[in-house]
Image (cartoon, coloured by chain):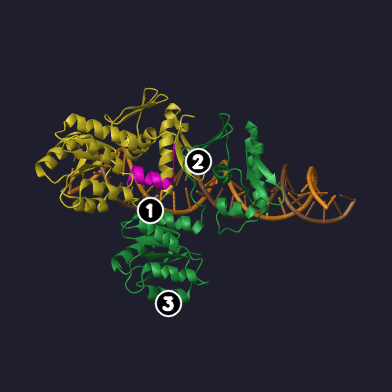
Chain colours: A yellow, B green, C orange, D brown
Amino acid sequence: MKANILIVEDESPILELLALNISQAGYNPLRAISAEHAEKLISEALPDIILLDWMLPGMSGIDFAKKLRSNALTKTIPIIMLTARSDELDKVKGLEVGADDYITKPYSPRELNARIKAVLRRKAPELTEDLLKINGLELDPVSHRVTGNNKPLEMGPTEFRLLHFFMSNPERVYSRSQLLDKVWGSQIFIEDRTVDVHIRRLRNILAQSQHENLIQTIRGSGYRFSTK
Amino acid sequence: MKANILIVEDESPILELLALNISQAGYNPLRAISAEHAEKLISEALPDIILLDWMLPGMSGIDFAKKLRSNALTKTIPIIMLTARSDELDKVKGLEVGADDYITKPYSPRELNARIKAVLRRKAPELTEDLLKINGLELDPVSHRVTGNNKPLEMGPTEFRLLHFFMSNPERVYSRSQLLDKVWGSQIFIEDRTVDVHIRRLRNILAQSQHENLIQTIRGSGYRFSTK
DNA sequence: ATTAAAATGTCATATTAATGTCATACGATC
DNA sequence: GATCGTATGACATTAATATGACATTTTAAT
């Protein structure tokens, strides 16, 4: 599942350039030319990251960031600020407002990608393409392959995403609804109990290499991926 | 017996959408397009939960909530506020007025269901996610793990919540009914003596790492979690 | 377009764990 | 030692999860 990155930038050429870079980096860019426009897009679907220009017509980037931070729904979306000059003052202000990172123009695509990746790693590791290895269980998002003790494990797409999510977020309990939101997507209406079934399917597959008890049931709470 | 959920919302499409979700979730939706209309329905039969739009023509949602709270008959009906924007101010006001929870539009059906479920169950106020450590006893809400001197301790959901509550509120005596309210939830009809049983179960588990006397009996008053 | 294969979500049922209550034992307090 | 409050063990009931089967949808292959 590609990460959705919302770019808020009033200068069209820069916006397009950013969007191009982002899509080349394997993410899904969403374009907004103002804070108001961005709000509309956000109300339709929450992006995973917001790239926010400092200077915007209408509501400024700072104010918009503040607003995003004060709303429970958008509070946790990472914001990367785009600033024209890199004076320290801006940096401080940006961090005060709650930006997770900031980039100065002219920016280098490589730097941009690095920042995005860093932020994703911190907030939503399952959206990165990092190779995951735990206790002889390997999942490669790039080649879309899973092996247990070097034995290839075949599974359906849903089980793959589920395992990917779990391996990216180990040692944490997730309720069935949280898993549905994170692995299936938030606008889908599926029974909680369906999660159980996919957990079983995944466990069955992992059992081929004795990794089935990496997925643990926490009665009354949900499931946890753990090596302990 | 299905729970009756009264929806008070003036915008017809939203009302229908809510009603649809609610009936799919196995509840019985009742529709009202204004506070006045709602009052009429309430006078016929008391609903189990009221979903109340913040902005209503005629009497506003806030005023209506106040009114409901001031009437002995309707005082105890849980109210979930529906707000267009989730600014903190609204939240505060809503809670002041006595709303039990609030949801911001656009809401996800799953979130709505989760809230309804939570309100129906009247679970204890949410405890934090912070790691709790006392005298070698550790409770991690995130991974849902308890260890005593690094030895894993297994326990049921109720004992976990009980311990979580105690560790979050140490050095304080709680009566059995207070514990029932805080750990089990307020609308539940359970014998006071049952608390004793769970205390014993918890003590038994904690005894594996010699932590059993962190839970002390205060004769005539209740129990206390204390290191002294 | 047609067919076959794979994947998916839901349901009914089985299994297991957790829960609440009771009867009784214990211990403190007067 | 009588009384009151608490501890404990057993047990029936309830609740949560696991499982197998199945209908439907998606995907891939021809």
Compared with A117, A7 (above or below) is below
The answer to whether marks 3 and 2 mark residues whose Cβ atoms lie closer than 8 Å is: no
Q: Chain of mark 2?
A: A
| Quadrant housing residue B13 | bottom left
The reply to the same-chain question for discs 2 and 1 is no
Q: Does residue B213 show up?
A: yes
- Residue farthest toward the top in the current orientation of the protein: A150
- The region drawn magenta spans A172-185
Q: Which residue is mark 1?
A: B110
Type of amino acid at the residue the image marks with label 2: Ile
Residue that appears at 42% across and 49% down = A192
Q: Which residue is mark 2?
A: A218
Q: Is residue B216 magenta?
A: no
Type of amino acid at the residue the image marks with label 1: Arg
Q: Which of these two is toward me, B83 or A56? A: A56
Secondary structure, mark 2, is strand
Residue A18, horizontal then vertical, whole percent: 15, 38
The answer to whether marks 1 and 3 mark residues whose Cβ atoms lie closer than 8 Å is: no
Secondary structure, mark 3, is helix
* The N terminus of chain A, quarter of image: top left
Q: Which residue is mark 3?
A: B40
Distance, label 2 to label 1, CA atoms, is 21 Å
